[in-house]
Amino acid sequence: MYIAIEGIDTAGKSTQIEVLRSLFPDALITKEPGGTPAGVEIRNMVLHGNLKSKTAELLLFLADRAEHTESVILPNMTKLIISDRSAVSGMAYASVQNLCDEATLVMLNRLATNGYLPETVFILRLTPEELAHRLSQKEHDMIESRGIDYLLSIQDALISAAYALGIQTHVIDATQSIDTITKEITTFIKEAL
């Protein structure tokens, strides 16, 4: 079973991934972008390079997704795969930047993944108030510095992208306790395995 944990920065993805790692020690834990050696190079190129073109950025992330699918996802389809982000994030960020229409983004992501998308995605959703509070507690990275409205638009786009890609989607209230969120995710996984 291939699942993905999605959410904007500060929603608790990393925390949930670490808890799931301990609860499912035989699972393959991976991430996008950067889940392969080539993916690490691509991610660094996008984050620290001098790209002027948002289209070039989109295409590099699609290249990362294709490499990740080929070298990580497909060889491990008999295992529980838990991914920190997926095609859902890639599509959401591209759609917020208005790089192309939804149908084109769906087609590009299906091409990059050869149709192997997560069976289920869990989207950790924050309220504007909780997002503002969490952002006030930390230094901001490049994405977070774009502001609350931008992050909330990404959050909405994550949900739209998951549905557009036809992935079973569970939106989870990320203002709940860590244990409550974990229980919601693990209950689903155990029932599905």
Image: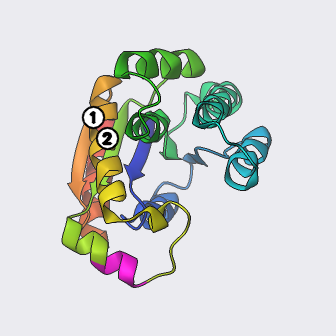
- Residue beneath disc 1: 160
Q: How is the image coloured?
A: rainbow
Q: Is residue 147 left or right of residue 45?
A: left
Q: Is residue 167 magenta?
A: no
Rendering coords of residue 14 (x, y %): 48, 63
Q: Amino acid at mark 2?
A: Ala
- Residue beneath disc 2: 157
Give the crowd class for mark 1: few <14, some 14-19, many >=20 residues within 10 Å. Answer: some
Residue drawn at the location 55% of the way across and 15% of the way down:
111
User: Is most of the magenta stretch helix, strand or loop?
Assistant: helix
Residue 193 vs residue 76, the one in the foreground: 76
Residue drawn at the location 64% of the way across and 36% of the way down:
53
Q: Are marks 2 and 1 in contact (CB under 8 Å)?
A: yes
Mark 2: secondary structure: helix
From this viewpoint, is residue 191 visible?
no
The number of discs equals 2
Residue drawn at the location 44% of the way across and 16% of the way down:
104
Please report the bounds of the magenta region as a residue range: 133-137
Residue 95: quadrant of the picture: top left
Rendering coords of residue 148 (x, y %): 32, 65
Rendering coords of residue 70 (x, y %): 68, 24
Q: Amino acid at mark 1?
A: Ser
Give the crowd class for mark 2: few <14, some 14-19, many >=20 residues within 10 Å. Answer: many
Is 11 drawn above or below residue 168 in the view shown?
below
